[in-house]
Amino acid sequence: MKVLKGIGYALALPVILVLIWWASTLGETNFFVPTPGVLAEKFAETWFGERILSDVLPSIGRLIVGVVSAIIIGIVAGLLIGSFKWLRDLTEPVLEFFRAIPPPVLVPVLMLLMGITDGMKVVVIISGCVWPVLLNTIEGVRAIDGVLSDSAHTYGIGGWARVKYLVLPSAGPQIMAGVRQCLSIGLILMVISEMFASSSGLGFTIVQFQRSFAIPEMWSGIVVLGLIGVAMSFIFQFTERRILRWYHGLREVENAA
Amino acid sequence: MTAQAVDKSSAAAPSHRRRSSKKLPSKQLLGLAGILGFLLVWELVPRVGIVEPRFLPPASEVIAALVRDFGLTAFWVAVGETMLAWLIGLVMAIVLATVLGFIIGSSSFLRKFTNSTVEFLRPIPSVALIPLAVLLFGVKIESTLMLVVYASFWQVFIQVLYGVADVDNVAMNTAKSYGLGRLARIRHVVFPTALPYLMTGVRLAASVALILAITAELVIGSPGLGREIALAQSGGAISGMYALVLATGLIGVVINLVMRWIERKTLSWHSSIRSEVIV
């Protein structure tokens, strides 16, 4: 019964919204808004063909490569910078400035430096995504509990063991917060790098549909981007639950007390 | 629940930083050295010829171009257009998100009812709306606004939802026992609880709004700094383009500083409670 109720709550509003959409497009034919039926039909027609190979998968591939490299670079550099106070002080203003630059303006810059290649698009994604991970890692490393750090020191835990058992777990929640921001920036940059300078990819295809006034196709492209966003957020939540299981458990205990 | 923990910790960051910066005066010197070192590397890389100066002009040239820009009306007009879109979009998003957040957050039925829809809509990247904005509004400020409002709305809305849900039961029941009406309860119990969350949301939304404002101008071509960057790039005014990129970075830094300042001002009464929660 409880499950049924939950499903009911989850489905009620979406169903109502789709019904309103269906009812309002029923009578007239609005050029800008396709009916649900047309959209579903175009969606299947447009994206379940060769386009999935030529546009969707390469885009997603670049996104994954870019995001994963950004996370690795961010964590490694963050651990390094976070562990030394002088290095942190030295780099902080410069890093703050780089973070404040809106990542999309890097598209024309990198286009100039690297030309319009796959590499450039990946670098755009990396150069936009790396900052939240990097800065959060630095913050996380800096905020390690002093007692824990001293205990580790006393027990002679140093080097890699220290990083693995002390630094990474205690910075973990902060790092994951950075990764979450990084994912949404990555998706935005993937689309923009293709909209701005490309001849293939999701972003390019959607803009192409819009320019040729293929409105239902354009809407279906927006739906694809939405689905990718939703899928990424699910994957992230799942991974985060696994990696930070101890942390969520700890918080539950704390909240209950 | 994760977001809650996470956003609280990011809200705490500035106060920590402030404390440590007061303790050590040499920190500023090191920071300055960092900036100078970065500029030096930037100056040398094209001069030595690692990257062609045609693609990456030396720092001195770019800074000169930026200083030249500061004297041009066209530059300030572009900055004004960007900031106008940023401000209008941000205010619209904040008002909309706060009102909806309070309404939906204070009823558990509405929360459950909208949860699936919110979770589905939130991750949709705002840039997916670019083609739609172009169709509806063309290359005008409205296109920029649409993206800015959409993107910043979620930042504030989610924070307000968490904030309203965080209301202390004892405080709420006490207010009820003392006969506070619905509006009075919202004003004196719910609002103070949600305010720190709201401010975190506003701070996040402010930087997201800038990103989207400039993105829209860059990709759609609505008036503002972003369009100037695209024009400079396609027109081959390379140091001019780098100067504009620097300018957007400076605007970003200023926005961050102002938002942190506002946050500190509005929450000065709250900071003791806040640091207690974070630990």
Image (cartoon, coloured by chain):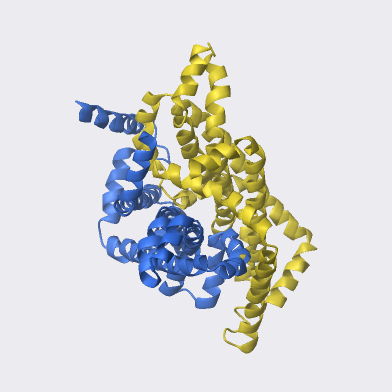
Please provide percent x and percent y for residue B254.
Answer: 67, 54
Indicate whether A257 appears above or below B275.
Answer: above
Q: As drawn, is A131 to the left or to the right of A179?
A: right
Please provide percent x and percent y for residue B72.
Answer: 78, 62
Please provide percent x and percent y for residue B151.
Answer: 50, 46
Q: Residue B245 or A139: which is nearer the viewer?
A: A139
Indicate whether B253 appears above or below B264.
Answer: below
Please provide percent x and percent y for residue A12.
Answer: 30, 29
Q: Residue B189 or A9: which is nearer the viewer?
A: B189
Q: As drawn, is B261 to the left or to the right of A231?
A: right
Circle count? 0
Where residue B38 sits, quadrant-wise, is: bottom right
Q: Specify the farthest residue to the front.
A: A154
Q: Specify the farthest residue to the top.
A: B179
Regarding residue A208, the answer to whether it shows in the image is: no
Please name the residue shown 64% across and 83% down the image: B44
Regarding residue B34, the answer to whether it shows in the image is: yes
Please name the residue shown 40% across and 44% down the image: B2
Where residue A86 sits, quadrant-wise, is: bottom right
Q: Specify the farthest residue to the left.
A: A1
Q: What's the colour of chain B in the image?
A: yellow
Q: Specify the farthest residue to the right.
A: B71
Please name the residue shown 64% across and 60% down the image: B248
Please name the residue shown 60% across and 53% down the image: B222
Indicate whether A243 appears above or below B70.
Answer: above
Shown in blue, the chain is: A
